[in-house]
Structures are given as C-alpha cells and as structure tokens.
Image: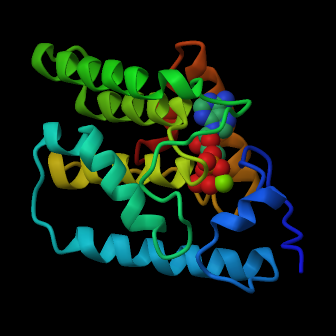
C-alpha cells in the first residue's frame, strides 16, 4: 500500500524509499503520518516543559541538537536523531553537515560573547542557518523552530516567538518561507519582523 504523500511547498517530499525507515507499519496516508509525528512531538514538548532552564551552550551543542530531533521523531522514524546520509537539493552536502554545524555553533558562541546581535536576532540567525544546513532527512523545519523556542524561553527568558501557523496555514507558510529566502541573502529583517510580537 503506497503512502501517497503530497508535500506542501517547502517541505521535504516523502519518497517511496522513505517508507522503509518508518517504524509504524501500515500507515496509509499523510494524515496518519502527521498524527503520529504530532503525538511524538507533543511528547518531546512535554519532556522540555519539565525542564527549568538550559545554558545556551547546552542547547546549541551537537549532542542536544541530535537529542531533540530524536525525542521529536523516534517513535515514527528510524533516522530520528541521526544526521542525514543522503544528498538533498537543499542543505549542506552530507560530508559537510557536521563541519557546517560546528561553524554555526562557534559563530553563535562568538555572537554571545561579543554581543554582536540582540538575543532575538541571535536565535533567528541560529534557526535559519540550522534549517539551511538541513542536518536531518526530514523534520528540519519543526526541529529548528523548537530549538529556537527553547533558546527563547528556556535560555533567554524572552516572550515566545510567533512564526505564524506555518504548519497549517498556506499563507503564513509562504510568508515564512519568503522570509527565510531573504535571510539566505543575509537580510534578516523580514524574519525578525515575523517573530517579533506586536
Ligand atoms: N530557502 C530556504 N532557506 C532556509 N530554509 C528553508 C528554505 N526553504 C525551506 N526551508 C526550511 O525547510 C523546512 C522544510 O524542511 P523539512 O525537513 O521538510 O522540515 P519539516 O518536515 O519540519 O517541515 C521548512 O519548514 C523551512 O524551515
Ligand atoms: Mg518535511
């Protein structure tokens, strides 16, 4: 039985050969897959909720980045918490993923030490570069937003970000993707405007 999955714009297509990585057998459509992923992510959020505070260095570490992805997707996907091993048309080449992540982590530490940007901008820049590296086979968008959320609320005690309803509302998703595209060229104003609460 095929999954018959249609991807929304800006989402990684789920291809036929992804099915072998599904832990839950017998899924027949995208709604079912969404449901199980959603449940898994709710569990990850619940785990985070019980945590009081994190140090910035902890959250941006390779270990935590992998751990959160694992907590979000391990009930559903075999590749949860593992760097991708397949080239994609977005993101770093497989061979560069760890090094690009290392550079991003070092940049964040530098920004932190030197107060290069506001806390808000540091988080937005980290989130954007993380999703641009695209470390995982799937879930990079949701993962990078959750990491940003943790930095926002559990590290810097800032008011929560609002990306808009990017998972359900096509208009909001379009705005968010356009803002990420602008950030690709170094212009973070749009994405900063998007998350800033008014
Ligand atoms: N031009 C871009 N620059 C940076 N990130 C992008 C761009 N286009 C898409 N993305 C990110 O990639 C995400 C989709 O990756 P994917 O691994 O499928 O995540 P998810 O499954 O959580 O949606 C989008 O939500 C967006 O955050
Ligand atoms: Mg996806």
Q: Left of 45 or right of it: where is 164? A: right
Q: Left of 102 or right of it: where is 116? A: left
* Depth order, front residue of 108/85: 85
Where 169 falls versus 152 (above or below)? below
Please identify the quarter of the rendering in which residue 84 is found. Answer: top right
The image quadrant where one finds ligand 1 is: top right
Q: Left of 99 or right of it: where is 58? A: left
* Depth order, front residue of 84/43: 84
Residue 17 in view: yes
Spot the residue most to the bottom. 26
Residue 179 in view: no
Q: Left of 99 or right of it: where is 171? A: right
Where 188 falls versus 54 (above or below)? above
Please identify the quarter of the rendering in which residue 72 is found. Answer: bottom left
In the rendered picture of this protein, how many numbered marks are placed on residues? 0
Q: Residue at x 72, y 48 (%)?
A: 12
Q: Residue at x 84, y 66 (%)?
A: 5
Measured from the top left, where is residue 6 in percent x and y?
86, 61
Where 66 falls versus 45 (above or below)? above
On-image quarter of the N terminus:
bottom right
Q: How is the image coloured?
A: rainbow
């Amino acid at each position: 039985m095929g999954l018959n999955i249609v991807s929304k714009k800006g989402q990684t297509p789920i291809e036929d050969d992804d099915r072998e990585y599904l832990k839950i057998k017998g899924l027949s459509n995208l709604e079912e897959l969404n449901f199980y992923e959603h449940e898994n992510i709710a569990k990850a959020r619940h785990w985070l909720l019980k945590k009081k505070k994190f140090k910035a260095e902890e959250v941006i570490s390779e270990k935590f980045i992998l751990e959160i992805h694992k907590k979000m997707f391990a009930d559903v996907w075999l590749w949860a918490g593992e760097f991708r091993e397949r080239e994609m048309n977005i993101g770093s080449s497989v061979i560069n993923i760890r090094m690009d992540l290392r550079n991003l982590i070092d940049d964040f530490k530098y920004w932190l030490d030197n107060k290069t940007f506001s806390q808000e901008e540091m988080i937005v820049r980290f989130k954007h570069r993380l999703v641009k590296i695209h470390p995982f086979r799937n879930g990079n968008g949701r993962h990078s937003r959750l990491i940003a959320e943790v930095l926002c609320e559990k590290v810097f005690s800032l008011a929560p970000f609002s990306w808009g309803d990017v998972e359900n509302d096509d208009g909001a998703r379009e705005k968010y993707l356009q803002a990420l595209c602008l950030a690709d060229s170094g212009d973070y104003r749009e994405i900063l405007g998007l998350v800033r609460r008014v």
